[in-house]
Image (cartoon, coloured by chain):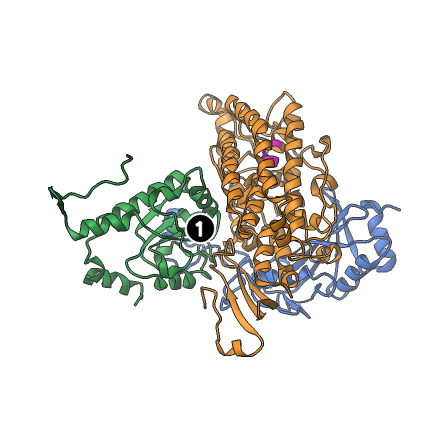
Chain colours: A green, B orange, C blue
């Protein structure tokens, strides 16, 4: 028997197991994230390596890449986002259903990177909220995997009512996302 | 602005033509390319490509960076084969300052460049397989690419955006681990590659799918400024490595594979054969790797040895000058081109003697040949159009500069 | 007869006496210069001449010299004759107040996007171009960013403080 995942903290006895709904749902969500790869440039090639056999992203319950935003849980922005691309990125984000998470892979997505130029968006957090930033130009697959594990941590520990809270609404309002 | 592909107006479906917006983020297009297609059923009548979705202003950026700092920008042109871009740029500057490299450095460059050509073509051919529905080859070939990445890491410490080598030669000599890994790669890769080739090259389904998809004639390809594997697939044996040899390519014996129809199958086969020829070149260069220094004697451009910087005044001064970009550069203009993964990658450098180029223009092969795409897919099926795009190996970084 | 760097200019000058000047050979490549009026006839001659067979447009780029009054903008063609394996460049300079230039798309369809790019970067208006729009930048951009007076960075960005990048008060390059 291989251990699949950590059991949530629970009270157990003969024939029953009690835990909080937050933990149960968090466990399920964290291990079945469907990512939407939004790969624009160099980091996309490293993502291809990450999802390839060598680094095997499928180990994290990410067997299925969701190319449709409607079914995706995690938006992985990999590569430079130019100003021309900004509105499209925002549209993809708004098309995703809650709950959703965003990971900015690479220096360009996080801050514009070396491209402090007139045509490049200086970080995707100018248009959408970001949960995890992965540094590197491009980050190695190990770093991308580390970022994904950080996302899993966030997903696992997210209170179930977070998305209904006024704080979250305030965050979305800041980005003018309905 | 629409994101997903869908029929933008249902009214048109009852008529004859439908408009389909493909891209800029679409699972079938690798990278961000937008095409607004006019469709008759599934047949493409007209395509209108839009590019520039990752325009990063390379040329403006290059005007604000000292020569040595432009190498990292070139990494991000065609990021599937960064070392070729790096070395193309180094050779451009060397041409400007009149610097001749020792043979060993040239051969080392050839080994690295051919390795990256293999890595580049592997992505393209594996992805053609994926787009025809054969994912298996992709998973095999990405494991082989990891071996090439390990070799690059051994030389420069980085995998993808390598910044490999320096103006005036290589940054360091090949390490013992590199020799060991390269020998292992040369011994093991060909068999695995042939396994991949046997999955697709004579595969009846694959051939039916790709033969005749997205063809272009040699005349038309020339008029559209095609270079590289795409031009050779159309039947024209133009290769910069042979036409204007650089970095001692004239020392090596290799064939230029050409196709006949310029269709997806020919482009695939030309790349496959080029991988074999690259291996031939690497063998020749590695077996005859000359002894001697791995960089030229250009103290104005090449960083001095680190221990010297700490102990010798002169070395410290040169170190400072090189890092700060205070190098004496002649006034003039240079065009230098190398055979990149996608064709003739040119650098047009205009120097006014300052620390940064006055103007640096990149001749980006992708940008020039992608404009033929609407013509190539006209009248073909939508699924062939997807395949044609992946077989042209359009790399967004190179396309959008 | 093979055309070389030495015989190229005489072969052209026979056809265009006094209309093309040669700047000689630097770094293995001959540079020629002509004017807006003669550039398309010259390119057509080069392409169609059975002797020269300049069949390939390698590159087309613009360049901006703010100090060359009356000749601020330039277009540089890199041409390649496969038959003679000869590369050379042709330059044309013209004033920035009148940035009109004849299109080369009539000769090479490859010039289409190259010219759109130079329009996008430098604002060179290629007369007769089938579809002259911006290509890389957003359509509503108001400036031509590669001209020397415009700065590299986006001046409206808020996350980076120019003082920490040693660029305080840097507003493009100064020319006077």
Instruction: Look at the image and say whether residue C65 sits in the magenta stretch.
Output: no
Q: Pointer 1 indicates a residue of which chain?
A: A
Disc 1: which residue: A79
Give the x, y percent position of residue A71: 36, 59
Residue closer to the observer: B260 or B33: B260
Q: Quick check: C170 above or below C135?
A: above
**Region in magenta:** B111-115
Quadrant position of the N terminus of chain B in the picture: bottom left
Q: Is residue B36 above or below residue A4?
A: below
Which of the pair C12/C172 is nearer the observer? C12
Secondary structure under tag 1 reads loop
In the displayed structure, does residue B88 sit left or right of residue A9?
Answer: right
Q: In this view of the protein, can residue C60 be seen by the observer?
A: yes
Left or right: A104 with respect to B326? left
User: Measured from the top left, where is residue C138 in percent x and y?
Assistant: 50, 64
User: Residue sitting at 53 percent across and 78 percent down?
Assistant: B14
Q: Residue C135: x percent and y percent?
A: 56, 63
**Magenta stretch, overall SS:** helix
Give the total of numbered labels: 1
Occupied quadrant, residue C170? bottom left
A55 relative to B247 in the view: left or right = left
- Say which of B250 and B254 sits in front: B254
Task: Give percent across and percent down for residue B12.
Answer: 52, 77
Residue A93 location, quadrant = bottom left
């Amino acid at each position: 028997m291989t251990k699949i995942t950590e059991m949530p903290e629970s009270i157990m006895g003969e024939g029953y197991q009690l835990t909080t709904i937050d933990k149960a749902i968090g466990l399920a969500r964290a291990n079945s994230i469907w990512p939407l790869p939004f790969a624009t440039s160099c980091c996309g090639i490293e993502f291809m390596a990450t999802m390839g056999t060598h680094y095997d992203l499928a180990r994290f319950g990410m067997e299925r890449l969701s190319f449709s935003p409607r079914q995706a849980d995690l938006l992985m922005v990999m590569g430079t986002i130019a100003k021309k691309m900004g509105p499209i990125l925002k549209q993809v984000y708004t098309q995703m259903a809650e709950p959703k998470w965003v990971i900015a892979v690479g220096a360009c997505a996080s801050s514009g990177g070396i491209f402090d130029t007139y045509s490049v968006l200086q970080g995707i957090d100018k248009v959408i909220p970001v949960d995890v930033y992965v540094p590197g130009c491009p980050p190695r697959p190990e770093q991308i995997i580390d970022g994904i594990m950080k996302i899993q941590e966030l997903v696992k520990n997210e209170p179930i009512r977070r998305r209904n809270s006024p704080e979250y609404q305030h965050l979305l309002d800041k980005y003018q996302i309905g | 602005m629409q994101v997903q592909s869908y029929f933008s107006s249902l009214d048109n479906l009852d008529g004859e033509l439908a408009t389909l917006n493909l891209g800029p983020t679409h699972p079938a297009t690798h990278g961000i390319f937008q095409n607004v297609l006019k469709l008759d059923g599934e047949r493409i009548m007209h395509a209108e490509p839009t590019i520039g979705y990752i325009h990063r202003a390379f040329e403006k950026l290059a005007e604000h960076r000292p020569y040595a700092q432009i190498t990292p920008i070139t990494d991000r042109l065609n990021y599937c084969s960064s070392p070729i871009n790096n070395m193309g740029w180094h050779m451009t500057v060397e041409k400007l300052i009149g610097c001749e490299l020792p043979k060993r450095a040239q051969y080392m460059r050839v080994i690295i460049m051919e390795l990256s050509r293999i890595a580049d073509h592997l992505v393209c051919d594996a992805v053609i397989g994926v787009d025809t529905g054969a994912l298996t080859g992709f998973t095999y070939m990405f494991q082989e690419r990891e071996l090439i990445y390990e070799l690059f890491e051994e030389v420069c410490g980085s995998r993808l955006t390598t910044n490999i080598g320096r103006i005036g030669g290589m940054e360091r000599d090949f390490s013992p681990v590199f020799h060991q890994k390269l020998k292992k790669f040369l011994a093991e890769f060909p068999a695995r590659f042939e396994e991949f080739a046997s999955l697709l090259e004579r595969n009846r389904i694959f051939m039916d799918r790709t033969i005749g998809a997205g063809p272009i004639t040699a005349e038309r390809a020339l008029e559209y400024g095609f270079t590289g594997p795409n031009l050779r697939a159309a039947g024209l044996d133009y290769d910069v490595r042979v036409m204007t040899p650089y970095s001692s390519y004239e020392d090596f014996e290799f064939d230029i594979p050409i196709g006949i129809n310029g269709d997806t199958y020919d482009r695939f086969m030309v790349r496959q054969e080029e991988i074999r020829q690259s291996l031939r070149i690497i063998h020749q260069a590695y077996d005859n790797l000359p002894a001697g220094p791995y960089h030229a004697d250009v103290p104005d451009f090449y960083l001095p040895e680190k221990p010297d910087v700490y102990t010798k005044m002169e070395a410290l001064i040169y170190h400072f000058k090189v890092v700060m970009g205070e190098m004496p550069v002649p006034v003039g203009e240079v065009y230098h081109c190398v055979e990149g993964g996608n064709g003739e990658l040119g650098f047009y450098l205009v120097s006014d003697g300052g620390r940064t180029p006055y103007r640096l223009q990149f001749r980006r092969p992708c940008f020039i040949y992608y404009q033929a795409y609407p013509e190539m897919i006209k009248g073909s099926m939508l699924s062939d159009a997807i395949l044609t795009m992946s077989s042209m190996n359009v790399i967004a970084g190179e396309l959008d500069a | 007869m093979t055309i070389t760097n030495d015989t190229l200019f005489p072969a052209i000058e026979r056809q265009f006496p006094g209309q093309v000047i040669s700047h000689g050979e630097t770094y293995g490549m001959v540079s020629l210069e002509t004017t807006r009026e003669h550039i398309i006839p010259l390119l057509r001659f080069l392409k169609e001449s059975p002797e020269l067979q300049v069949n390939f447009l390698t590159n087309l780029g613009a360049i901006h010299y703010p100090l060359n009054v009356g000749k601020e903008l330039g277009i540089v063609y890199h041409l390649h004759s496969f038959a003679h394996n000869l590369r050379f460049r042709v330059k044309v300079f013209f004033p920035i107040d009148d940035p009109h230039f004849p299109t080369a798309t009539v000769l090479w369809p490859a010039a289409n996007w190259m010219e759109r790019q130079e329009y996008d970067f430098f604002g060179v208006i290629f007369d007769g171009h089938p579809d002259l729009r911006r290509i890389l930048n957003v359509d509503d951009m108001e400036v031509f960013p590669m001209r020397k007076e415009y700065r590299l960075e986006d001046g409206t960005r808020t996350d980076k403080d120019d003082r920490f990048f040693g660029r305080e008060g840097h507003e493009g390059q100064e020319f006077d």
